[in-house]
Image (cartoon, helix red, strand yellow):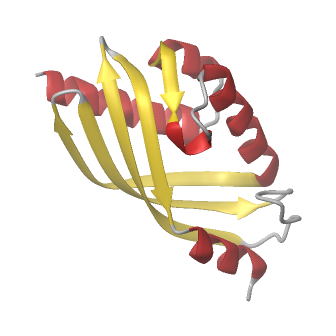
């Protein structure tokens, strides 16, 4: 059952933290020694800061899980992410454009909490869609 429980935790992480931007969920869902490798080995406070930056730049975020694989402590997710560009994001001023990109996320779950997270996405496609070029 550990694999199913871990996948459920990761689905909740994606919904509450990424899609709905609830910083209070970070403390509930992440281990005290959480490391977000995508954000320069960010801890929980670093994840909250990244969430704030994203919330200032993007609105109407949606994350559709296409595939999930869970084995032991690891859960891998392939998803489609979309949002609308409403404020400065990744150094680019608001364009009002929407984007849709594929993403891969790998999570490590320990003792019922997310302890590590890796995230890869097509930055070039994202920037092209936001800039309209």
Residue depicted at x 31% and y 17%: 110
| Residue 77 vertical placement versus 83 (above, below) | above
Where in the figure is residue 98, as x and y percent of width and height? 68, 70
Which of 62 and 117 lies nearest the eye of the viewer? 117
| Residue 81 vertical placement versus 18 (above, below) | below
| Residue 26 vertical placement versus 108 (above, below) | above
In the picture, residue 24 is in which quadrant? top right
| Horizontal side, residue 27 vs residue 104: left or right | right
Residue depicted at x 74% and y 84%: 132
Which of 90 and 51 lies nearest the eye of the viewer? 90
Where does the C terminus fall, quadrant-wise? Answer: bottom right
In the picture, residue 22 is in which quadrant? top right
Where in the figure is residue 84, as x and y percent of width and height? 71, 62
Q: Residue furthest left?
A: 1
| Horizontal side, residue 3 vs residue 58: left or right | left
Q: Residue furthest right?
A: 93
Where in the figure is residue 4, as x and y percent of width and height? 18, 29
Where in the figure is residue 69, as x and y percent of width and height? 20, 45
Q: Residue furthest front?
A: 40
Where does the N terminus fall, quadrant-wise? Answer: top left
Residue depicted at x 73% and y 74%: 130
Residue depicted at x 72% and y 46%: 54
Which of 64 and 56 lies nearest the eye of the viewer? 56
In the picture, residue 26 is in which quadrant? top right
| Horizontal side, residue 97 vs residue 35: left or right | right
| Residue 16 vertical placement versus 115 (above, below) | below
The total of numbered circles placed on residues is 0
């Amino acid at each position: 059952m550990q694999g199913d429980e871990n996948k459920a935790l990761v689905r909740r992480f994606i919904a509450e933290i990424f899609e709905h931007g609830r910083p209070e969920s970070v403390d509930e869902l992440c281990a005290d020694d959480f490391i977000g490798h995508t954000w320069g080995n960010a801890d929980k406070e670093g994840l909250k800061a990244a969430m704030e930056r994203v919330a200032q730049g993007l609105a109407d975020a949606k994350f559709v899980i296409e595939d999930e694989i869970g084995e032991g402590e690891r859960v891998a997710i392939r998803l489609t992410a979309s949002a609308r560009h409403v404020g400065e994001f990744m150094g680019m001023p608001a364009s009002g454009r929407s984007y849709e990109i594929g993403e891969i996320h790998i999570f490590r779950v320990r003792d019922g909490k997310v302890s590590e997270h890796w995230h890869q996405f097509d930055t070039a496609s994202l920037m092209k869609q936001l800039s309209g070029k």
